[in-house]
Image (cartoon, rainbow, N blue to C red):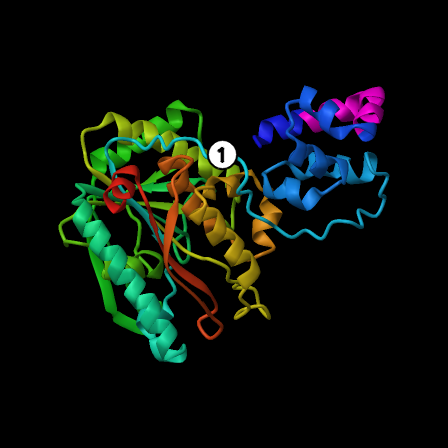
């Protein structure tokens, strides 16, 4: 069921007490007049906020169905658990023609700096996932690679998303006692500036930076995935410590579609980070496998963009602050594109739930059938 339809129906019921009374007496019949099918009329009728939240309905709207419609002052029937909505039909994918690859992977530093701290079989499965994604990226033969990561050790002027406009990007993992794990990338200033211009034309705040010092956020994935050393790379850096907006990340990706669709370059898009992990003192090492599973279910179902409907706390509470990086990629890909999970490993020693996912763009789906 479309989120907008659900919210409009709930708000209509909230404004009209006589309509709500009739709905309680016959939710299916009255719900149909509001655009609801029987299943979602029942969801609203029983005050199931958990289900509505999983469909992307705003928490301020969902609370009406329990505290007001059901007079449940304690909201006692809801637990805050998330469930992927697999009943609403997917839209047909509408991927920009020049987008030839999209995927996501974690950028855990220990995978390269000290893999021995994690279970050997888990490290092997995760590494195999990276190798599989590398083959996909190489086969796509892109002319430019856009990569998202979050700010770790860099310091920028604003709290906006950063677009790296430099001719080169360099750095190492010296912070992790491994200066030998370094990387030098070729940039693409003209394409990067086109991204900046497009964002500003749509009224979005964005910061351009001629210097993006590479750290593990880009070094870990690109040392494993970069198909050739001369492939131009444009880094996009999110800053969850300064601003955290799942909705804003998705919109950034949606505007990025305008650039990719209007320029004759074969583009690959890679999101990095996550899934769940916390850097908070006292919480490092906890892995929220339940929420990670929910995220992966959404990706498999072609509904990853639903995460952009969640309020910030819902993601932050589950250690998903790096998912902004993924939402930019998902906004570019658009709805209805399923993800294939190559690996997921919860690893307490390195501190998170690590994953590798390939997005099945329409051409790939056709080739696999």
Residue 270 shows in this picture: no
Q: Which residue is mark 1?
A: 89
**Between 318 and 248, the one nearer to me in the picture:** 318
Q: Is residue 241 left or right of residue 76?
A: left
Provide the major secondary structure of the magenta segment. Answer: helix
Q: Is residue 33 left or right of residue 3?
A: right
Q: Which residue appears at 34% of the width and 69% of the height?
A: 125
**Between 351 and 129, the one nearer to me in the picture:** 129
**As drawn, 355 above or below 55:** below
Task: Tell me which segment is drawn in magenta.
Answer: 9-23
Residue 97 shows in this picture: yes
Q: Position of residue 183 (x, y in %)?
A: 22, 60
Quarter of the figure with residue 209: top left
Q: Is residue 211 left or right of residue 117?
A: left
Q: Which residue appears at 18% of the width and 51% of the height?
A: 138
Quarter of the figure with residue 48: top right
Q: Position of residue 80 (x, y in %)?
A: 68, 51
Q: Quadrant of the C terminus?
A: top left
């Amino acid at each position: 069921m479309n989120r907008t339809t659900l919210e409009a129906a709930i708000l209509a019921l909230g404004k009209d007490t006589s309509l709500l009374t009739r709905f309680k007496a016959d939710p299916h019949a009255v719900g149909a007049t509001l655009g609801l099918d029987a299943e979602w009329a029942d969801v609203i009728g029983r005050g199931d906020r958990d289900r509505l939240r999983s469909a992307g309905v705003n928490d301020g709207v969902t609370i009406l169905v329990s505290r007001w419609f059901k007079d449940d002052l304690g909201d006692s029937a809801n637990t805050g658990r998330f469930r992927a909505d697999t009943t609403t039909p997917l839209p047909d994918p509408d991927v920009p023609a020049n987008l030839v690859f999209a995927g996501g992977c974690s950028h855990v530093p220990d995978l390269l700096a000290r893999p021995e701290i994690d279970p050997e079989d888990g490290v092997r499965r995760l590494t195999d996932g990276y190798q599989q994604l590398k083959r996909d990226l190489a086969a796509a033969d892109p002319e430019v690679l856009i990569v998202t990561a979050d700010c770790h050790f860099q310091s920028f002027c604003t709290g906006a998303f950063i677009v790296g406009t430099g001719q080169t990007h360099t750095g190492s993992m010296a912070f992790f006692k491994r200066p030998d794990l370094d990387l030098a990338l070729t940039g693409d200033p003209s394409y990067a500036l086109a991204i900046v211009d497009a964002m500003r034309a749509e009224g979005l705040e964005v910061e351009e930076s001629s210097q993006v010092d590479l750290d593990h956020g880009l070094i870990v994935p690109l040392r494993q995935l970069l198909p050739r050393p001369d492939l131009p790379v444009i880094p996009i850096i999110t800053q969850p410590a300064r601003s955290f907006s799942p909705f804003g990340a998705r919109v950034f990706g949606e505007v990025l579609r305008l650039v990719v669709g209007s320029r004759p370059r074969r583009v690959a898009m890679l999101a990095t980070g996550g899934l769940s992990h916390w850097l908070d003192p006292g919480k490092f090492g906890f892995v929220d496998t339940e929420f990670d599973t929910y995220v992966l279910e959404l990706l498999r179902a072609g509904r990853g963009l639903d995460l952009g409907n969640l309020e910030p706390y819902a993601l932050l509470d589950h250690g998903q602050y790096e998912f902004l990086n993924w939402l930019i990629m998902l906004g570019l890909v658009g709805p209805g594109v399923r993800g294939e999970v190559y690996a997921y490993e919860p690893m307490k020693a390195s501190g998170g739930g690590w994953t590798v996912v390939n997005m099945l763009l329409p051409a790939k789906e056709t080739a696999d059938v």
